[in-house]
Amino acid sequence: MSDNGNIASPELRNDDVLLDVQHLTKLFAAETNFFGKATSYVHAVDDVSFQIKRGEAFGLVGESGCGKTTVGKMLVNLLRPTSGKIIFDGKDLTAMKDSERKSYCKDIQLIFQDPYASLNPRMRIGDIIAEPMIANNIVPKDKVEARVNELLECVGLANYMRNRYPHEFSGGQRQRVGIARALAVNPKLIVCDEPVSALDVSIQAQVLNLLDDLKEEFGLTYLFIAHGLNVVKHVSDRVGVMYLGRIMEIAPKRSLYADPLSPYTQALLSAIPAVDSKSKRERIILQGDVPSPIDPPPGCRFAGRCFKRLGVCGNSVPELREVKENHRCACHLYDPELPPTEEMTRAAR
Amino acid sequence: MLKYILKRILMVIPVLLGVTIIIFFITRVLASDPAPVVLGEHATAEAMAAWRADYGLDDPIWMQYVNFLVSAIQGDLGTSYYTHTPVASELAARFPATAELALCAIIVASICGIALGVLAAVKKNKLADNASMVLALIGVSMPVFWSGILLILLFSATLHILPSSGRVTPLLQPTGGTGFFIFDTIAKGDFEALGDVLVHLVLPTVTLSLYSMAIITRMTRSSMLETLNADYIRTARAKGLAKRSVNVKHALRNAMLPVSTVIGLQLGSLLGGALLTETVFAWPGIGKFAVDCVLKSDFPVVQGVVLLVAVIFVFMNLLVDIIYAWLDPRIKYGAKEEG
Amino acid sequence: MLLEVKSLCTEFPVKRGVVRAVDDVSFEVSEGEILAIVGESGSGKSVTSLSIMGLLAEPGHVAGGEMTFDGKDLVHLSEKEYREMRGNDMAMIFQEPMTSLNPVYRIGDQIVEAIRTHEKVSKKEALTRAIDLLRKVGIPSPEARVRDYPHQMSGGMRQRVMIAMALACNPKLLIADEPTTALDVTIQAQILDLLRRLREDTDMAVLLITHDLGVVSEIADRVVVMYCGQVVEEAEVRLLFDNPMHPYTLGLLKSIPRLEDDDSKRLYMIKGMVPNPLEMPPGCHFSDRCDSCMQVCRERMPELVQVGDHKVRCFLYEEQDGHAKDAAEVKANEEKAREAIEAAREVSTAEALIEGDVAREAEEGGADER
Amino acid sequence: MIGMSKKTVLATQGAAGEVTNSQAQQPVEKRESIWKDVLDGIVSNKAALVSAIFILLLALIAIVTKLVPGILPYDPYEQNLAESVQGPSAAHWFGTDIQGRDIFSRVLVGTQITLVVGLAAVAISLTVGVLLGAIAGYKGGKWDTVIMRIMDMMLAIPSILLAIAIMAALGQGIEKAVVAIGLVAIPEYARIVRSEILAIKENDYVAAARVIGDSNFAIVFRHVLPNALPSIIVRATLGISSAILDCAALGFLGLGVQPPDAEWGDMLGRGRNELFRAPWLMIFPGLAITLTVLAFNLLGDGIRDGLDPKSRKR
Amino acid sequence: SGGGSEKKGDGKAASGDKAADSITYSLTADPRALDPAYFDDGESAVVSCNIYEGLYGFAEKNAEVKPLLATELPEISDDGLTYTIKLREGVKFHDGTDFNADAVKTSIERLLEPNRNSDQPYASFVFGEEAANSGVKTVEAVDATTVKITMRAANTSFLKNLAMALASPIVSPKAIEAASAGSAITTPCGTGPYKFVDWTKSASVTLEANEDYWDKDNAPKTKNIIFKIIAEGNTRITSLLNGECDIISSVDPSSANQITDGGYELFSEDGMTINYMAFNTDEGGICADKEVRKAIAQAINVEEMVSAIYGEYASVANSVMPLWMAPYDKDVKQTAYDPDAAKATLAAKGVTKLACITYSTARPYNAKGGVELANMVQGYLSKVGVDVEITQYDWTTYKSKVQTDPYDICFYGWTGDNGDPDNFMNLPADSNRSMNVAHWDNEEYKALIAKGIATPDGDERDAIYKQCEEMMAEEQPWLLISHSKNLLGYSPKVKGFYYHPTGVAFFKGVSKEA
Ligand SMILES: Nc1ncnc2c1ncn2[C@@H]1O[C@H](COP(=O)(O)OP(=O)(O)OP(=O)(O)O)[C@@H](O)[C@H]1O
Ligand SMILES: Nc1ncnc2c1ncn2[C@@H]1O[C@H](COP(=O)(O)OP(=O)(O)OP(=O)(O)O)[C@@H](O)[C@H]1O
Ligand SMILES: [Mg+2]
Ligand SMILES: [Mg+2]
């Protein structure tokens, strides 16, 4: 295993890091033997490290099944990491006991992907938004209602809607309720798990703009999960690209989009259909499917589909190393110990 | 798959142990004293005490249980207090009757239930749907003994077209063989007896199958409605398949998955439900016998019956699961066990 | 012309009224052309395609209009004739590759079934053809994969199987209802590439249904934009993307985050939400959400009129009498619409949203009081 | 702090704002609840509606005959051997039994016991079953294994035999019948509740509740159980009908209520001895049972349709 | 042949004097066993009495003892202790074994201590107990055709016991040997007119004619006798009406008309039973007081009640013993119905509540089960201001509850075993509380009973039992209710059928027209 996370990039080093994820790994039992012991594992998240600054929006991108949600769930304590650390606001959450950890729960909130499944259909939305405040005792009982109204306005819902049930709302409105619920406890970090992917095109912009506004207004920090680079581009400051449980590339937005280093990122970018005829890019069509995360082969996870694959890719795991300033990439193409490649020279320029 | 079956068979053991404990507790601790019934009118208190001692009923309860378990594992279910016959042979003599009836009933119930259910689903909200659902519901709503007696009244007492009692006219009864008369008569080529066996089966089968039929109809309908809405049905229709072939080949096969589970469960409950039907139709099975034995506090037999039914029920479920796996290629047992 | 749809109306009687899911929709598809229909969820795209295929789910029915396919009148076709045509002359693939294949049959058998429904060939021969088809859609080692069950394949593979099945009888028209929506971007690129190749190889016409404007711009020749069951704009693909006329099309294009965009700017939001099909605003269906809404828009439904190479349904481009305005006025109005949209970008989100909601509620007010 | 800046927006909104305010003052009506769904299901399904009315009628009869016994044409308990076993007539619509009691009056009074039996038995199995099912489903692991194995054991014993054994052990009487019937039905409820909960547990809103720091108790009672309610209600409605049938079966086997209580199953069981002489002794209570059970079944189906999100188009 | 229609067809239409080759008789339950040593139930007795025979039997229509396998009535010594019995010659068991004195000795000795086991319910009743110094001491085979039985004490009813179908019949020694020790014979083998063929549990027992039956005058006339087990009363009746059975037993009184209306014969003769209500006379109970017992008895219109429940198919009991058995009742007066007097007495005694237990299962002496009776008594007593609280149990539970429950009144009955008056009259003197459910403990009465059993049949003995009857009427430990009639239905084609009051049916003279 490569040791690629403990040195924070220089850009971050001096700054106030809110969340520091180190070597986070999550395995799920895929097959069990007679006595219920796992015999093979889904490597859902495999040695993932990244940091998020206060007030920053960090985008996490990758195709379906690459482990984005699993990362998010581990952050909000819905799943226990198999190994690795989550250092939040200077404290190691993974080392805490459940009771201790509970007090940090409210600082990290989650916005779900599916606006239809994430609101209890049998509760009025007023109660849904009030619930976290009551559960965490952060607002006196008699102030709850006023605060609910405030939150509703914040997310662009009229306060008379308080007494309605979720099914009376459209997807976009529900997602806004979900946002209000997350805001209710004044969290420091909000994990947005594909908050717009289930929404209509015309509604997506509403939610994205809203998240932007709120970030501005309350100085929130986001972990923004998405599977398309286009959405992330609009919201995040820095972006991490995941593939099959591993981070392939982390870079500030501008650098990543202007000059993607990892072949996977390049393919991902090119696969996004362009609306503008002017900006027709060269298309890279990847062959094959994402392989199964159950007991993945050694070496680079992307090796099987890579169009720039080298001999070593199949057996050795590339390190996530800083190739350009603040721009790190896990790819053998940029391995200084290997013979120089065209890409390496280009990146060096 | 084999591993899965093995695992399931092992899981059966604690269930059966539990069943014996429950029934042991109910019979030994709660039920009334069998001695007065067994020994008859003239028995004195001393005779009864002696008898209890003979049968180990004054041992501590756990010891009785251990004794029972030890001999049960050796295949000895004990001897009936009342008839002094080994429980195993009492059950062997009666079980085929119940099994034959239950099998016929489940077959009739499945065929009619599935047919009605499919009809109802395909003609959703039309007359045929409402009619078959009401029919099914009436089946579920009538007390079995009531409908049985009414059927006897109509077909036997009034129209004289069907016999009201027993499995077969005694002189035609096939001897030896499996005890499954349909099978035995066919094996012997005795078609007069086969006819006789079949006419005797009609009323009890109908009565017994009504309840299960209703359940299967309901299940088939809802399962069928669900599959008819599935995407692959649209795909099949987009291929240009005829409606019939879509309904049968694509919808029904998938709809059968949950239905098969229900049918399996029904067979278990039919064994229990046969009890009232057997009473009404003088059917020589274990159902009526079991009730009598409960009422006579004939503990060894009650234990035996319950154990037998539990074994059948449990293995029925196992069988259903295996059939399910066979019907549904998606299920690869052993791979997914919720943990 | 391969397929002609004229003033198609499709209705679903429901408990509280009649949902007119497709309302006066007309378009044409010629041989070898890829026509895309775009629109948001619920805009009637699927219903349109199902109407063409004659596969509408029960109480739904075609309530008016004409459909001609290859010279045949689809509206009055008998079920038997329709069946012969389905899967043979026109085939369809669906959005959900995970559920569109029957889970209990091998994929080979499912393709064989499609072939043998329309052609009298032996099972063996059909199987050989199935293997060829799978190879054609790019499934590696098809000889082995024909024996797979759907659950043994990934989503992309299944979508290929669906395409192979659709191609089984060399249809003249392939209707693809959101064939890539459920797939990952890299897989989506593969499928789009496949469709493009197939069209080149077979000269088959494709009616592509999607809500993803990106997909449209990648592959389509011509685009029909639908909103609330109606066609609001139709044009050649480049023309539409470079010069959208209807405020809705314009809004859509502005609201999707694009790689090329300057991301310091806020996204444009179409405020409010799609109206309930039973409680449509009285005038133009889009009027509530439109930033260029005029009085007339709330009173009357505009017609779909030909403006240059566009067809568009909007009073910005239509005279009261149903004719297109003259070129200069059109130009001016186009400009106006663009400005309105740019202006709307700056409104704070929550503010705009509340406004949108309230407007809609007011519209539905009657219902709410009950 | 959050939202302060938005306050002004509403104030300056003009016309739209007024709409908002006027609507905000609307009385807070309960807009949509599970009970409304139930009601919708019933009302929109003719058979269920008729059944519901029938059941209400039964309940009314039960209450009225309890409160004002004088309303009955005859005293259902009074022996009048002079009129023993008379066929249906203008005086005795359903005839009389061997003790000369009016069957019609007894059938009417029988609604009391029948409904109480149905409700009480279901109450027992519901309470215990929901509790066990909830623990098994929510806690999972060992709890699940142990509870569900016990339920399997109970299921493996034919329920009527189990009920008879319990009755034989407890002795006869309506309360005991209720207990026996209630006990044997527990596993079904436990199973349903468990599988519902397993499904509901997977929903994001349960995860959301955990993320915001809800306690397990709150999650189960606020998020999980209310959403399992539809299937529980449906099961309970159907459960009433099977409880009534089970009670009738026990009555038929001579294990029913204590005399002189009028219970339909008991009347039926007793009447069958007179089948040839006095078929009405068996026909009318049998019809009463069948109709009542049918009504509960139809009602259950109606409620199921009403609560089924798929059939509830919105 | 099977189907109802066919059966019905050849039953009704075909005529002629050819004999049909089988008669089907319905039993209400499985026989408990087909070994006379191991059963105590009527079902077993009905079947067994056609397979086995005893040394003695009863007369065709009453309980008079007649020689059967013995050639004449025994020679009884004057002290009543020695019975010398001459056996019939040339009789063979069905398995070909000779019937002789050794066979008799073997059959009886397996029921005597110490061979006796606790599974033989009637052994101690018929052959007595060492501990009680009663019954048989020894059995000797004097020669091949003579048996000598020595008693421990004189017992006038012993001879009648020997005529019973329970315990007494003679079984092939070979069959006894073949059966495993201490358990019942499974292939029955006797000397009777019918041979055992098959017993399908819960379904039927089939017998076939014994071609070599010794009594050529009474040779079996029908090839097969089939006993079909039908528990449900309505099904039994239907099976008769539908031609599935030729004779059905235990007809419910209320269905009797159905049988005659259908053109079938109804057999209705007094049985050997008494159906009564017992007062709990235990010290401290409400009914310990004779006045209260009498008053309760006055409140109940027995005649009306009997006719309502049983119609004409039971007779109101005026005596403990059935009329045909007892010449003693003529002058016995039972308490008369007088509700007003009852009301007054009960009010004076402050009786307002009585606990009653009853059984829900039909019994031979009460085809309707005890609930109907309890219901009506409840009805009568409510009219004199007494609330009766009824608790019902199934028969098995009931039998243990009568020994443990604190009841004031309970319902019970008795079916005679052997036609001897002692068999009835000793019940209220029995120390066994499940026999004496009134818990009546009257020394004077007990003395009478002891005297009766030792007195040889004759006027002296009759007088003793008459006195007993009078005491019962006067002391009122019981309220006598009814003597049931044996009700059977049978096809008119069945000839020569008679149901014996001891609860058995002999088929040797019975035939059926085809
Ligand atoms: N509870 C679980 N048990 C077993 N495997 C799981 C579990 N949850 C997730 N996985 C597996 O872990 C991998 C990562 O899943 P995850 O949901 O994190 O992906 P994702 O990136 O969020 O995908 P998507 O874009 O589809 O939401 C997948 O292969 C998934 O099948
Ligand atoms: N079976 C039906 N009953 C009633 N209304 C229906 C039915 N099917 C579709 N509709 C209505 O028809 C309208 C159009 O639906 P359609 O499925 O064509 O939308 P779509 O554009 O394909 O959306 P999506 O992108 O979600 O697939 C919707 O408003 C829907 O409510
Ligand atoms: Mg995810
Ligand atoms: Mg669609």
Image (cartoon, coloured by chain):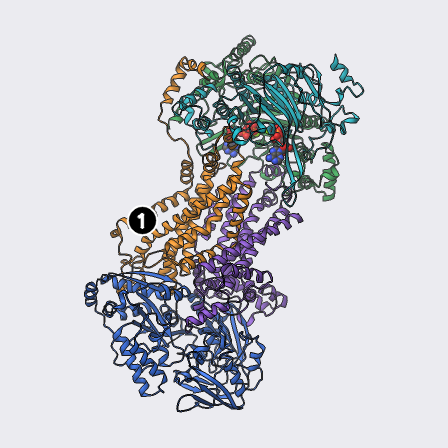
Chain colours: A cyan, B purple, C green, D orange, E blue
Q: What percent of the width, then of the height, locates residue E185? A: 54, 75
Q: Taking E489 as reference, is D237 above or below it? A: above
Q: Where, quadrant-wise, is the C terminus of chain C in this rendering? A: top left
Quarter of the rendering containing residue E481: bottom left
Marker count (numbered)? 1
Residue E28 in sight in this render:
no
Instruction: State which chain disc 1 sits on.
Output: D
Residue closer to the observer: C78 or C336? C336
Quarter of the rendering containing residue B245: top right
Q: What percent of the width, then of the height, locates residue A299? A: 74, 29
Label 1 CB less than 8 angstroms from ligand 2: no
**Residue at the outermost right position:** A339
Question: What residue did someone put label 1 on?
Answer: D61
D270 lies left or right of E245: left
Q: Taking D171 as reference, is C313 above or below it? A: above
Q: What percent of the width, then of the height, locates residue B181? A: 58, 65
B134 lies left or right of D111: right
Q: Where, quadrant-wise, is the N terminus of chain C in this rendering? A: top right
Are there few (<14), some (14-19), or many (20+) residues within 10 Å of tag 1? some
Q: What percent of the width, then of the height, locates residue B274? A: 50, 59
Quarter of the displayed picture in which ligand 3 can be seen: top right
Element marked by disc 1: helix
Residue E326 in sight in this render:
yes
Residue closer to the observer: E45 or A37? A37
Going by the numbered disc 1, the residue's amino acid type is Ile
Residue closer to the observer: B24 or D266? B24
